[in-house]
Image (spheres, grey):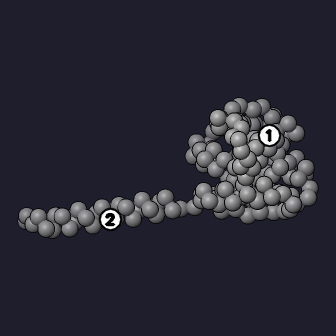
Amino acid sequence: MFLSRRRLLADAALGAFALLGFRRLVLAQPKPALTVYKDPNCGCCARWVDHMKANGFIATVTDTTDMTAIKTKYKVGESLRSCHTTIVGNYVIEGHVPAEDVTRLLKEKPKGILGLTIPGMPQSAPGMDMKPHQAYEVLSFDSAGKTTVFARHP
């Protein structure tokens, strides 16, 4: 049985639309859920949550005035601390880590690390958004507090 040109073109178009629809469905899938612990009076933390939501993450926020207990519970050493602590998958995200770095972490799943941190509050990190841009690094850290540069944001 031979296919007419019209039928062949129709089948090709249908296949292309199906492929595009599947691609949209895959791309539209939300990223994993975040559990964010922050001080209820911290505006930059709320802006970071907005940054993560804008990048496809689903966030549950728990306001607490005892951030020290949260950081201790999740083994975030004092030199690695920032203003908020987030749990995503099996990782700890400390501070204003960009969504692209969290996405990369979840994709690569590096062994032996507890999470990512930006110690302190760099003025150019998501949620801080101050000008002029200030270069900063995102560090990975393990349960002993050993750090390695995970990403640079020049």
State the CA–CA distance, disc 2 to disc 1: 46 Å
- Which secondary structure lies at badge 1? loop
The percent position of residue 86, horizontal first and vertical second, equals: 75, 53
CB contact under 8 Å: marks 2 and 1: no
Residue at the spot 62% in from the left edge and 59% down from the top edge: 54
Say if 17 sits above or below 108 in the image. Answer: below
Q: Quadrant of residue 1?
A: bottom left
- The picture quadrant where one finds residue 4 is bottom left
Label 2 crowd (10 A; few <14 / some 14-19 / many >=20): few
Q: Is residue 33 visible?
A: no
Q: Nearer the viewer, residue 2 or 47?
A: 47
Q: Which mark is residue 119?
A: 1
Question: Which residue carries the number 2 mark?
Answer: 17
Please state if 2 lies on the left or on the right of 9 as rendered.
Answer: left
Residue at the image position 78 percent from the left and 55 percent from the top: 45
Residue drawn 69% across the image and 40% down it: 133
Q: Which residue is depicted at the point 27% across and 67% down? A: 14
The amino acid type, in three-letter code, at marker 2 is Phe
